[in-house]
Amino acid sequence: MQKRLKVLVYGILVTFLLFGIYDRNKNPTVVETFSVDSYTEEEVMDELVTAFFIEEITKEITNFYQEYYSGEIMIYNYETVITNIAKKEPGKISVTFGITPQIGAHNPLGYDELIYSVDSMGNKKLVDYKHLKNYEVPERFRKYLIKPFK
């Protein structure tokens, strides 16, 4: 009886581990690390703000690139920079991010600019998405290209 219980418990643990690995690999990967080169208070604050937006940024990047590229795309926190923060209208703050999605081992796929509006309750709304630059896709990744970028 105890042997069956142990086998059942081990089976359940292995199942949870496998589902966790599968779930992580279905979407573009967000590399969960901060830049090792951030030292100033401003750099650390930028990283903190980016961390609060990274899930939304990843969703928008995924939506845009799925039309063009079917391979795995990496979103590195340290390849996501805040290019502007300003109060554009009463009660709202505008945050502009520059993102360089990567493929493989640090091969840039493009450069995109996302602008969010944030209210005093922390509600975030995407205001604008601009795909500003394409990078040449290395030969080994071209099999994942669906169509040329606009």
Image: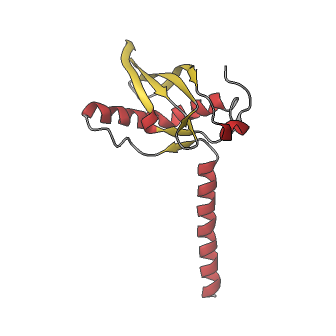
Colour setup of the view: secondary structure
* Number of numbered discs overlaid on the protein picture: 0
Q: Residue at x 59, y 80 (%)?
A: 6
96 and 74: which one is in front?
Answer: 74
Q: Quadrant of residue 95?
A: top left
Residue 33 is at least partly visible in this image: yes
In percent of width and height, residue 1 lies at 64, 88
Q: Quadrant of the C terminus?
A: top right
Which residue occupies the foreground of this view, 134 or 60?
134
Q: Residue at x 62, y 49 (%)?
A: 25
Tell me, yes or no, if residue 91 can be seen here. Answer: no
- Residue 67 is situated, as x and y percent measured from the top left of the image, at 70, 29
Pinpoint residue 123: horizontal percent, then vertical percent.
46, 28
Residue situated in front as seen by the camera: 58 or 127: 58
Residue placed farthest to the top in the image? 89
Residue 140 rendering spot, x and y as whole percentages: 67, 41
Left or right of 63 on screen, residue 79: left
**Residue sitting at the far left:** 40
- Residue 60 quadrant: top right
Q: Residue at x 35, y 31 (%)?
A: 46
Q: Is residue 56 above or below residue 128?
A: below
Furthest residue in direction front, as rendered: 139
- Residue at image coords 56%, 19%: 130
Q: Is residue 130 above or below residue 138?
A: above
Frontmost residue, 141 versus 56: 141
